[in-house]
Image (cartoon, rainbow, N blue to C red):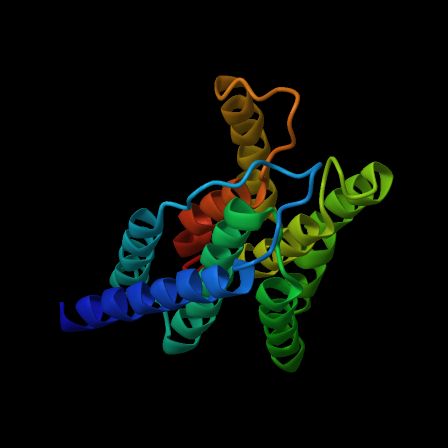
Amino acid sequence: MTGIALAAVFFGCIAFIATQLSRALCAGVSPAADGPLPGTPPYAILVLAAVVIGGSLVALGATPVQIGIAAMVIFALVACWCSDTLCGLVPDVFTLAPLAALLLFAAAQREWDLVASAAIVFAPFAAAAMFSRGHGMGWGDAKLVALAGAALGAPLAVFALAIACVAAVAGHRLARAARGPIAFAPYIAAATGIALPLGFVR
């Protein structure tokens, strides 16, 4: 029980730091005129969710390496959720840095399936970003998706991201904002976070 409690507190602290860094990065940044409307991220819910995920990983028997990787991924998910909500941006520092670290680790361990998983899920989102010129799908979202693929593995990532897409469309319609763009990172982050314990303990 002590290990579960410590992991829960650790992940909660990681999420809190992510919210603060995201707020600092977005301070003074004006959302793009053609971007999603700015809002207020659910800070308390994000920290609480991180607490639950951290405790769950230990309860499910995750190794210390898996816990460390999961903490890095949770930091990225929370930071991207907050940044996209606050100013309509998914900064590279929150996606490329953890993605590079995860891919380097995978290469060092010769776990090429993780590299392939990142590429598999990145490809369709990158194509959408390219064809929409960043309006229908942003490159930041595509990079966040690649991180999700590397963290979850292709089968689980494809399923989780499909759920994220459906939820984004449904949420957008329920909000009656059909003519405005979707802040997609929160949906990607939520689906990835929920699936994360399954991705690391499989």
Q: Quadrant of the N terminus?
A: bottom left
Work out whether 9 lies above or below 148.
below
The reply to whether residue 61 is visible in this rendering is no
Of residues 74 and 112, which is closer to you in this image?
A: 74
User: Residue at the spot x=71%, y=46% of the render?
Assistant: 138
Query: Which residue is situated farthest in the right direction here?
Result: 131
User: Residue at the spot x=54%, y=36% of the render?
Assistant: 164
Total labels drawn? 0
Q: Position of residue 171 (x, y in %)?
A: 50, 26
User: Residue at the spot x=33%, y=57% of the render?
Assistant: 50
Of residues 95 and 148, which is closer to you in this image?
A: 95
Q: Position of residue 46 (x, y in %)?
A: 35, 51
User: Residue at the spot x=67%, y=53% of the render?
Assistant: 140
Q: Position of residue 47 (x, y in %)?
A: 31, 56
Work out whether 177 lies above or below 96.
above
Q: Is residue 32 left or right of residue 77?
A: right
Q: Quadrant of the C terminus?
A: bottom left
